[in-house]
Amino acid sequence: MKILFLVTQDLESPSCLGRFFPLARYLAQLGHEVNLVALHSDFSFSAENQFTRQGVAVSYVGQMHVRKRGDGKTYFSTPSLIFVSLKSTLALTRAALRTDADILYVCKPHPMNSLAALAARMLQRKTVFLDYDDYEAGIGHFQGAWQKAVIKFFENGIPRRVDHISTHTFFLRDRLLALGIPAQKITYLPGGVDVDRFEPVEPVQVEQLRKDLGLEGRKIVAFIGSLSLPSHPVEILLQAFDIVHAQVPESALLLVGGGDQYETLQKQAQSSGKTDNDYFAGRVSPAEIPAYYRLADVVVDPVHDDEIARGRLPLKMLESWISEVPFVSADVGDRKKLLGEPPAGLLARAGDASDLARCIQKVLMDNALADELRKRGVKQAGVFSWKNVTQEIISVMERYTQK
């Protein structure tokens, strides 16, 4: 098969790094011809716009709807956003119309890549798949009601106009069914563990990182991900860690990642007066992430019980498993189901800093429990390897290309 992925973010952005590119790479490993056309978070400074990575031909053709530089994220003014969106839509459309791919794979129902794919479907009768991996209309990063209305329009409308849909949570699958999408048009495609990216890290590298960060002798509670609210309510973890540190004085909180609330969360941590125990590493390169996981004693995914959390499958859960690090979150969405039985992690009450602190303390203070969670996590990592989770969607693709 020939497959063209249409992506509105770059390879270093969370969904592309943890979902779209691993899926594309695994298809390439199976002998399929795979191209990935994407937008870049800082297109004017992108050093390389066309390259091949692990068998996938990658092309950056335009600017994302936000700009990322350093540890922060900035949003365009409304006129600039409209201009950037139109320009990038045209670039993606040109790529969709020029390809001889059998399948166009739209990664998120965003306006820019969706319009590009639908143009190719209408003009050239291309087969279009959609990967629906977030409920973005509920996230709230909008400059006005008009922008939210546009995103909601596409999230509700595009699934009706494509040939097939993959989605990674039962919440989103049920949402599609409620929109009237036939069940046979939907494939549940949970997140996969990127085994190749998380190969074992040399202990000397981990210890050097520990030394560089000044974390010798500390028990490390880590959050690794985007520092962007409300999709990642890290303020719950900051409150929980104050409780943890009172009981486990040698503990330290390590926050790895950038985002639009990076400075806000830093100020919140400083206001607690415990800055010697909170470490903000900022945005780090994807190649460095495995070492940060191996550094941690526990990785935490703080969540509220809301539609945002129900529609999200945390990559940090999968990445904790493959890194042999205990994982703590809350019983929201698919988390409990994916943890398995016995569970490969602990679940607190959603939005409850005290209960989250209780779970973190259990891991830090009970070595036998921590070891058991590591073993269970490794087992779940095998279940959710990309090799296993992609088999059904590959079968679906083959049915469409054999028609």
Image: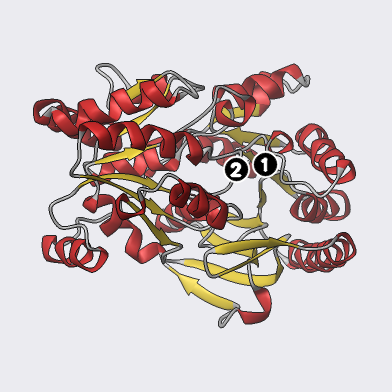
Query: Which residue does the image show at 84% across and 46% down from the upper left?
Result: 147
Q: Mark 1 and 2 residues: CB-CB less than 8 Å, in contact?
A: no
SS of the residue under disc 1: strand
Amino acid tagged 1: Leu
Does residue 221 sit above or below 102 in this rendering?
A: above
Judge left or right: residue 309 versus residue 29.
right
Amino acid tagged 2: Leu
Query: Which residue does the image show at 78% across and 55% down from the upper left?
Result: 112
| Residue bearing mark 2 | 229
Front position in the image: 399 or 8: 8
Residue 63 location (% of width, % of height): 71, 68
> Could you tell me how many numbered marks the image carries?
2
Cα gap from disc 1 to disc 2, whole angstroms: 26 Å
Q: Can residue 383 be seen by looking at this rendering?
A: no
Rendering quarter of residue 315: top left
Rendering quarter of residue 186: top right
Q: Can residue 217 be seen by looking at this rendering?
A: yes
SS of the residue under disc 2: loop
| Residue bearing mark 1 | 130
Front position in the image: 92 or 362: 362
Quadrant, the C terminus: top right
Mark 1 surroundings: few (<14), some (14-19) or many (≥20) residues within 10 A: many
Does residue 280 sit above or below 346 in this rendering?
A: below
Rendering quarter of residue 256: bottom left
Please tell me whether mark 1 or mark 2 is closer to you in this view. Answer: 2
- Residue 280, numbered label: none
Judge left or right: residue 108 versus residue 126.
left
Residue 322 location (% of width, % of height): 27, 44
Residue 203 location (% of width, % of height): 12, 60
Residue 188 location (% of width, % of height): 54, 28
